[in-house]
Image (cartoon, rainbow, N blue to C red):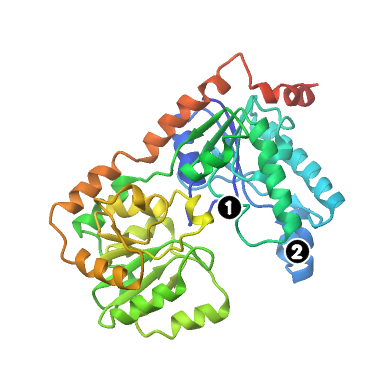
Amino acid sequence: MRDMIFVAMENWDGMWRRNQPLAMEFARRAPDHRILFVGLAQDVSHALRKGRLGTLLRAIFPPKELTSPPGAPNIFLLNPVKWLPNTLRWGRAFNRWVEQRQIRAACRRLGLQQPLLWMNPHYALHLVGKVGECGAVYDIGDDWTEPDQKEWLRQLVIAEDAELCRKADAVIVVSEKLQQMKRPLTDRLYRVPNGVYADRYAGVAERSLPPHPLTAGWAHPVLGYTGTLHAGRVDIDLIIRLARRFPEGTVALVGPGELEADTVRRLAAEPNIRLTGPVPFNEVPQVMAAFDVCIVPHLVTAFTESLSPLKLYEYLASGLPTVSTPVSGFRDFPELVYLAEDDAAFESAARAALAEAADLPERRRRTAEQHTWQARVDEIERIIAPVTAAPDIGTHAREGVRQWTS
């Protein structure tokens, strides 16, 4: 394994997604190597417009040392400074030039030698060949051309994504839909879905975890959902109707909200719906221990078809019965997941789940053990071995090595 520059679409915080477990597993396997984890940019122009002095001060007076997340002394966190609005073409070009310089400077401070460039966002395209990398990997977790956005931005996303697929030494996708979409763009394409730390959810199945304070007063049965609440992903009407069909129970929505205020008010108006807000990654199993049934009230759209839901493997590892709309990932386990096309079917499936066969929880747990993050990184290491093998370096990175070392 080599040193890495790991470019993510989020910061390293209590809400873990795909990037954090992958980076943590890489770091664990190569403790003598270092990972520069590049999170979200500090947006100076936005901070000035919003009067956020703290962001401006951190940009002007950055910390002298890069910090590491708990339990990962060989991962170092960097939030580059973005000085100008990206809506201006010349501003975007300037921001990218500055980011390249900041990442190269951080690599020098850490002593990174021809690191592997791992990119989650399409907008990291400008880094390929510019940061002294041995090769470039593009890891695609969502179809970002689908969400509602301005047309100029959508066209920019399409162009950057296509060019990065062509330039990367390996392109990894999480779903069959994404694999179909990217196949015309590269012949270096691989599918590696999301995974799970299966052992973290053993206490949920065994009902051995102490109750989380958030769950106090929840009436049973508890129908629980974990994950971001986003209008383009969850079916709000289905959630409300489900709550009304189980007036004696609780519908718990656990995770950060990205809903409009009117939608939040609609949900909060239902007496048995609970909105917890964000819950740290390490506390999620304790909250799930209060669930009787896990629910996935997702909309079936082109965007949700591109996903590999993290919650699929977490729910399986918990052993809990799960009721889902027929979305990507969950359709692959019809013998372990209850699939429901509409409101009535969702209610019937939830009631059936409450009285399911005794052997199903253990079958789910055994299945989850085949989809651990450790197994996913085993597969990724086989994919990237030709890219990282010394003394060769990735085809698309050689120019960058010359630029950085000349």
Residue 64 in view in this figure: no
The answer to whether the residue labelled 2 contacts the one labelled 1, judged by CB atoms less than 8 Å apart, is no
Residue 10 percent coordinates (x, y): 58, 52
Residue at image location 87% in from the left, 50% down from the top: 90
Residue 236 percent coordinates (x, y): 46, 73
- Tell me the kind of residue under disc 1: Asn
Residue 88 in view in this figure: yes
Residue 61 percent coordinates (x, y): 75, 53
Kindly state the secondary structure of the residue where label 2 is placed.
helix
Q: Quickly name the residue at label 2.
A: 46
Kindly state the secondary structure of the residue where label 1 is placed.
loop
Residue at image location 68% in from the left, 31% down from the top: 167
**In the orientation shown, which residue stands out farthest toward the top?**
391
Vertical placement of 387 versus 347: above or below?
A: above
Residue 334 percent coordinates (x, y): 28, 51
Return the residue nearer the eye: 329 or 92. 329
Residue 251 horizontal side relative to residue 153, left or right: left
- Tell me the kind of residue under disc 2: His
Vertical placement of 9 versus 247: above or below?
A: above
Report the disc number at residue 11: 1
Return the residue nearer the eye: 158 or 64. 158
Report the disc number at residue 182: none
